[in-house]
Amino acid sequence: MNVYSEEVVSEKVGPIGFITLNRPKALNALSLSMVRELTHVLRGFEGDADVLAVVIRGSNKEGPFGAFCAGGDIRYFHQAALSGDASLEDFFTEEYNLNHIIHTYRKPYIALMDGIVMGGGMGLSQGIALRVVTERTQMAMPETQIGLFPDVGGGYFLSRCPGNTGEYLALTGQLLRGAESLAVGLADVCMESKSLVALWDGLQSKQWKDGDDVVAWVKEQATTHAANASTRPSWWDSNIDTIFRLPTVSEMVEALSQLVSKQPEGWAAETLKALRQRSPLLLAVSLEQIRRGRSVGLSDELRMERDMVRHCFHADHLSRRGAHTDTAEGIRALVIDKDRQPKWLPATIEEITPDMVTPFFQSPWPTALHPLRHLVDTF
């Protein structure tokens, strides 16, 4: 089965299914057509008895493989929100369904996560057999910066990071470079970026016994060509768990302020500055998401996210829709007008109340009509 589309290229070579995200000018940001093509291709490989494993990569803008995937196409999100384009609803339903397919895939799935891996790119690469990063990897879930929350299953996989690191990553959008992602359980091996081409070629030329054999060989290559990168995060601080286990974002900010009063520069000051720049409302929503996600299965967590994202663009309990939502405003400030001066509502973390947050977790659909009602955990 060889399938060639403009944005997703897939090819079966021997018993391996190869997928290349092919939208390099947009850093392989996911469009609705890409989500649909990936779903089609993955289902095809899964149903093909001759395919033993699947490998996915990004395409070249810089470096051997370029960016893996910079997330969803947020310019499209903004345009669709302002125009009332109903396909925006389809995008999130189908993307979260794709995330579920990947987490529950019945064959080994290997992601070569070179370059930028953010948002939707994390949804394509978590919950799989092997997550390969390089010294060039730049990984993050930066959604609170645009008035969104860490979706694509973020409430599931971030909440399972060590201690309260998941809350920290979700709220701040902290960038993980190279092997730092191994330390928080978001990658498995780190290898030299320059060795990826030989790895890709080797997968096409070797003989394989089964899918486990493929995974074992890739791990061996990653060890042989390991990147010289520390797994100790440069941003790590002993106060992370203490601060980010606090019940509310407001209490976190207060605790950080106290640390800054004693030491004006360093981790606390940088973290406080980051939180002050994010959407206050979506910080509180994201914190609640991580806390709820820690105690539910993947399917329920994705259904919860589908409810949440609907409220992001239709915040009826706040009498806000479309351009008047924090999500549309955040995208406007970051990528449309690029003034980086979002006008959040409410404007400060201290103004957030529980009745602003709780409705994000109330489903707008009856259980029997939920767009992700069919999801079932099979792992």
Image: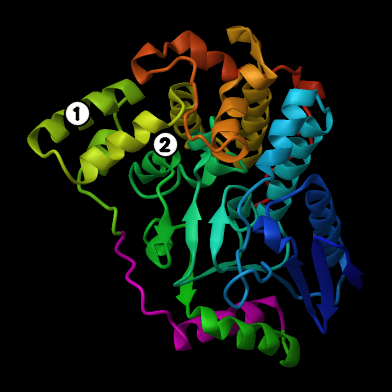
Q: Which residue is mark 1?
A: 257
The amino acid beneath tag 1 is Ser
Q: Is residue 52 magenta?
A: no
Name the colour scheme: rainbow
**Position of residue 205 measured from the top left corner of the image (x, y, whole percent):** 74, 92
Which residue is located at x 45 percent, y 42 percent?
Answer: 159
Residue beneath the point at 58% across and 9% down: 318
Which amino acid, mark 2? Leu
**In the current view of this chain or complex, which residue is farthest to the left?**
262
User: Which quarter shows the N terminus?
Assistant: bottom right
Residue 284 is situated, as x and y percent measured from the top left of the image, at: 44, 24
At horizontal 82% and vertical 84% (from top left) the residue drawn is: 14
Q: Provide the residue designation for mark 2.
A: 171
Dot label at residue 321: none
- The quadrant where residue 212 appears: bottom right
Look at the image and give the residue range highlighted in magenta: 210-233
Q: What secondary structure is found at the residue carrying circle 2?
A: helix
> Do we see residue 248 in this rendering?
no
Considering only vertical position in the picture, is 320 above or below 193? Answer: above
Name the foreground residue: 40 vs 34.
34
Find residue 198 and report its horizontal and vertical position in percent. Answer: 62, 88
Q: Nearer the viewer, mark 1 or mark 2?
A: 1
| Secondary structure at numbered mark 1 | helix
